Amino acid sequence: FAQGAARAAEIEETIAVGSPSWQADETEEATVEEEEDDDDDASTATPPGPDGETSSAPTPSWVEYFHELRGTLGVGARGDGDMVLLSNFDSAAAELPVSGELTVKFGDGEVSTLAAVPAAWNERFADGVSAPSLKECGGLQLGTKDWKAQMVSGAAVLVERSLIRKSPAAPDWATAVGLAAAEGAVVVIVANDLYDDGPQRPAFRMGVFGASPPSVAGFMISGGDGDRLRQAARERGGVSRVSVATVRNDRKAAPDAVSLAGAPLWPLRGVPRDVSQAWALAEAVAAAAPTDELREELRALTARMTPAEKRVWLARRLQRHHRKPHQDEPALAFVECDRAGPQLPQLREMAAEGTGLFAPDVVGDFEVRFKNESAVGSAVLREWMDVCARRAFVRGGGTLLCTRDGGRTFWPNPAAVYANPHWRTDFEALGRLLGLAVWQQVTVDLPLHPYVGECLLRNGAPPLSGDGASDAERLAAMDPDVARSLAWVKDPANDPADLCLDFTDALIDAEHALEGDDDDAPPLPELPAPTRRTVAPGRDALGPDAAAAPLAPGSCVELRDGGEDVDVTAENSAAYVEAVAAWRLRTSLERPLAAVARGLRAAVPAVVLEDARKMLSAADFCRLLSGLRDLDVTDWRKHTRYAGGLRPDAREVDLFWDVVEGWAAGPPASKQRLHGLLQFATGSRRVPVGGFAHLVGLNGGRHLFTLASGHHMTPGSLPTAHACVCTIDLPVFESRAAAERKLLEAVLVGTKRFDEHETHTSDSEEDE
């Protein structure tokens, strides 16, 4: 990246702060997710399998190349020094041991080559092993007396991943391989036979998990390759020779080499695997050593990012801002929420005490508990944020938000400034909730209008007339009916005097319930009787010590001094239209949005908002906050994992999806059950932008929706959710009707509180 080792070290320190995803991570789950991320766009070759079919060779992402290159700062003898530069990244990556080959010779003389992923402890380019036989474990648990008795010294050992999981003596990969090495194995090949990682059961890199590295190499092959290998061995007279090794990518040019996939192009030169990671790396490099070329590549990468990638970018940008090297332990903000009580007064209490959502540091550890409920964790936080969004801001008694499209999107209600003395605190609480949602990568069930998103990206300042779109265009997007009416008034062919208008505009103060809103929401606090009033923007806003003064329908705001007494005529119609536009697009929003932006900056500071405005459109920003309105069951099913021995073709799985697809095909009330089911499983009612592939689990990390076997559950049990990791345990379903009844009961009861006993058993005798 630079011209010397000192400069490289400086830049590496910058990059190390840039993203947690660049830190070497040898955990099984993280590596699996990285492989899954690349499934859709991976460029992989297909060497033949034992039965003549093809087998995809795993190609790690460019991030993995970068890790290894940065860790060594030079591999091989390239003739251009030991430094890894942007200019030589592609050639350097070609020398990394990123792929493995498993060659098997069968008893009938046939030879097949499979793709294998070398373990993290394998010695670079020195892990090649040959063995005269391949020994299977026969279902025996590793480390047991019977297992040791059937081991053969000098053999390669094939072991199923499920068998390692079942073996108490093998708590991790390294220990499992070490046990085999102690019995004379020269190499261990693990077949991923678990559907936990999806139907493809992919191979991935095994780490050491803090254990001592074993003395022999380890490799992993996919579950499909493992099945084919065992079947071919049975049909072709066993295995007479096994060879396995990591290979350099430049072997793909050799005439006799198997066509394994090579290194992907450097992301700034070719098609990246992860545009957001490419952008973040280029940004870090540009910050340390800026060039016009890098700036141009950043602009090009920005244009290519999907909204889901922009969401990842923003999360990483915030990490770089808030998480500094060698910082102290993060502060803890704590919330105890009374689910049964009104939410807005609880937020005001936090503001007065400087706790919870109003803690000095909301980007440290943030813990939420519901009163009289025992659960804590990521899903509890997600559900609390949804509860606040729906019960405090959409219909919380503070007239804070209004809608002009039937609840699809929301705006700050201009009436709040004149009716609610707590409007400053309440709108700041809304901003803090939105900022926390961005920081925690949580979607909240509160879709904002894109114009509101545009203002927030401008640090709360509404755009001036002529700044971007015209006022007429913005009004048409905001309220088409009002825009058409104003166009009619402004048309010289019409006489606005017939409408008996004056220089005032109506104040909208009606609250709106979201679709599928919970019927058991607590009653709102009693307020004084509303009155019909005409207010002036400059003088009638309520102060914090004033009494609540609800506005009755028909209340209005003056668009100029004495506006009630000024009729709209053909002569002043243009001024009237301009005044309405200025009020609706700017004046009515300035103070509420300033308070929202003040709260938003608690987690998303102005400098990050400035960067985000270059990266995100207003619509992108709003989708990032609220996710997707509609749930696509096809996408849901496609991005589902199966765990605990549950297979995708299991009867309970078929019944589960049959019920879900039936709800999706039903009337609106039936479709709302899907949101309840998602909330039951994850704590959120909405899917992040990008769909179910980007579902958020523990601590804001990606975690696919998972169905697990409920073999530990009684026949009368209801489904149980592990919402922090987006997992539902499925009990036995006696019939399709029983499946629907159990799922519906779990959704209706399980979204009311987080105690497991509430959804443990069914009251239906038929289910028993």
Image: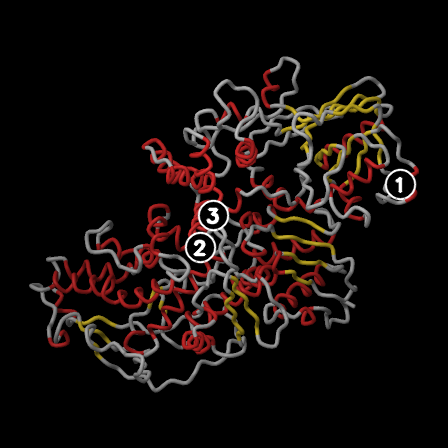
Q: Secondary structure at mark 1?
A: helix
Q: Are marks 2 and 3 in contact (CB under 8 Å)?
A: no
Q: Are marks 1 and 2 in contact (CB under 8 Å)?
A: no
**Which badge, 1 or 3, is on the more N-terminal residue?**
1
Q: Quadrant of residue 528?
A: bottom left
Q: Residues within 10 Å of mark 3 (few under 14, many from 20)?
A: some
Numbered badge on residue 129? none
Q: Secondary structure at mark 3?
A: helix
User: Residue 650 placed where, x, y %?
Assistant: 74, 49
User: Residue 288 placed where, x, y %?
Assistant: 38, 38
Q: Which residue is mark 3?
A: 312
User: On the rendered structure, is 697 left or right of 307?
Assistant: right
Which scheme is used to colour this image of the protein? secondary structure
Instruction: Measure the alpha-carbon separation of dots 1 and 3.
Output: 46 Å
Q: The residue under label 3 is which amino acid type?
A: Val
Q: Which residue is mark 1?
A: 147
Q: Single out the residue that lies furthest toward the left.
A: 571
Quadrant of the frame with the N terminus: top left
**Which badge, 1 or 2, is on the more N-terminal residue?**
1
Residue drawn at 66 percent across, 63 percent down: 743
Quadrant of the frame with the C terminus: bottom right
Foreground pick, 243 / 714: 243
Q: Is residue 253 above or below residue 525?
A: above
Q: Secondary structure at mark 2?
A: helix
Q: Nearer the viewer, mark 2 or mark 3?
A: 2
Q: Which residue is mark 2?
A: 322
Residue drawn at 62 percent across, 24 percent down: 260
User: Residue 242 placed where, x, y %?
Assistant: 79, 24
